[in-house]
Amino acid sequence: MKPVVIKNSRVPGWLSWFIKVRAITLFPFIFIKDEGDEILIRHETIHIKQQLELLIVGFYVWYLVDYLIKLIKTRNPKWAYYHIIFEREAYDNQADADYLSKRKLWGFIRRKK
């Protein structure tokens, strides 16, 4: 599924409570604060795939729980965000132009080490 990309959006700013975000994916939309680039759009499209695999709501529940556990353990919002299982897959693979075509089901669990 191809996401709907909305550039120059205010949505990322509205949702930047703990850390500043440049883009956010709220299925099926990708809201980007500026014009974005290929890598950013690929990162957010990885989240679209993850959301579909977890029937959308499951993604948001798992994402929030994973973030809160890491935040409670470290008391560091930025570290907790970057170590969410879904973010790790997206950051690890955002520069790979072929990743979305070769990505396996539940790719966030099968991250490269």
Image (cartoon, rainbow, N blue to C red):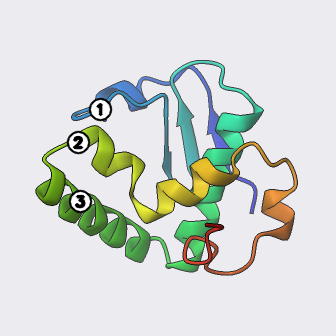
Q: Dividing the image into 4 quarters, which one contains the N terminus?
A: bottom right
Q: Quadrant of residue 101?
A: bottom right
Q: Say what secondary structure mark 1 lies in.
A: loop
Look at 53% across and 68% down and name the residue there.
51
Precedes in sequence: disc 1 or disc 3: 1
**Residue lying furthest front in this view?**
113
Q: Quadrant of residue 12?
A: top left
What's under tag 1, amino acid-wise?
Answer: Ile
Residue placed under numbered mark 3 in the picture? 70
Mark 2 crowd level (few <14, some 14–19, many ≥20, 10 Å Cα): some
- Looking at the image, is 97 positioned above or below residue 13? below
Look at 79% across and 60% down and name the residue there.
100
Q: Quadrant of residue 53?
A: bottom right
Q: Nearer the viewer, residue 87 or 61?
A: 87
Look at 65% across and 25% down and name the residue there.
36
Q: Say what secondary structure mark 3 lies in.
A: helix
Precedes in sequence: disc 2 or disc 3: 3
Q: Nearer the viewer, residue 28 or 48?
A: 48
Residue placed under numbered mark 2 in the picture? 77
Residue placed under numbered mark 1 in the picture? 19
State the separation of the CA atoms marked 2 and 3: 8 Å
State the separation of the CA atoms marked 2 and 1: 7 Å
What's under tag 3, amino acid-wise?
Answer: Lys
Precedes in sequence: disc 2 or disc 1: 1
Q: Dividing the image into 4 quarters, which one contains the C terminus?
A: bottom right
Q: Is residue 27 visible?
A: no
- Asked whether the residues under the numbered discs 2 and 1 touch, taking CB atoms below 8 Å apart as contact, a structural biologist would say yes
Q: Nearer the viewer, residue 92 or 25?
A: 92
Q: At which x and y percent is residue 69?
A: 20, 65
